[in-house]
Structures are given as C-alpha cells and as structure tokens.
Image (cartoon, rainbow, N blue to C red):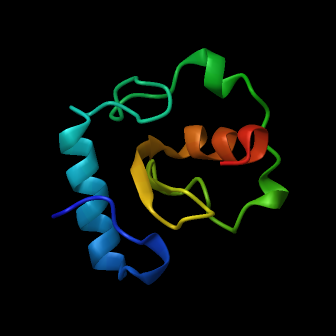
Amino acid sequence: MKLPILYNYATSAERREARNQYIEDQDGLCYWCNCPLDEDPPDKITSQEINLDIFPDGFLNFPIHLQHDHDSGLTEGAVHAYCNAVMWQYHGR
C-alpha cells in the first residue's frame, strides 16, 4: 500500500491495511513515543491524565490507532491509543 492515505475517505479495510503497513514500516514502534506497539506506552505518556469526555465513545478500546493530521487528512503513522489521546488533548494533533 502506498502511504500516506486520506483518512477521511478511506474505508475501514483501507485504514486497517494502512495501520498494519505503518506498523511494519515503523518496525513495530509507536510513531509518537517510539516504544513497541505491543507493549504499554512509557510512564511519561501514561502519567498524563486523559479527559475521556472529549473523545468519541470507545476511543481507547483498540490498542493501536492510525494517526492522521486533522488539517490535511493524511495519515502519519501507527500509535498507541493512549499516545493518540495525549497527542490530541495536549498537542492538538
């Protein structure tokens, strides 16, 4: 699959394929914290309190998310769900 893709126009199957391709391209490391995606994010991430009220229901239900730029719609990489929440809440990403 050619990356990046336009997140908002991709089907769920295309998003899953892109996420899996990013995981492979990133050698299994999170785009944001650079730690293994099959492990919990580091304490420097999980110690930041998340306001779940600002996220869609079930936001943290899936452990790995496909991060995309909210302005361009282009995907950026695979991230831990908690890293995605921190990116959104604290960094506007």
Residue at x-position 36% and y-position 34%: 37
Name the quadrant containing residue 3: bottom left
Judged from this view, the residue extending furthest toward the front is 72
Position of residue 4 in the picture relative to residue 27 (left or right): right
Q: Residue 28 placed where, x, y %?
A: 26, 34
Residue at x-position 54% and y-position 57%: 61
Name the quadrant containing residue 79: top left
Residue at x-position 84% and y-position 59%: 53
Count of marks, rendered view: 0
Q: Residue 2 placed where, x, y %?
A: 19, 62
Residue at x-position 59% and y-position 53%: 60
Q: Residue 41 placed where, x, y %?
A: 50, 27
Position of residue 56 in the picture relative to residue 7 (left or right): right
Position of residue 36 in the picture relative to residue 9 (left or right): left
Position of residue 24 in the picture relative to residue 73 (left or right): left
Q: Vertically, is 41 above or below 20?
A: above
Q: Residue 74 placed where, x, y %?
A: 45, 62
Viewer-closest of 7 and 60:
7
Name the quadrant containing residue 38: top left
State the quadrant of the N terminus. Answer: bottom left
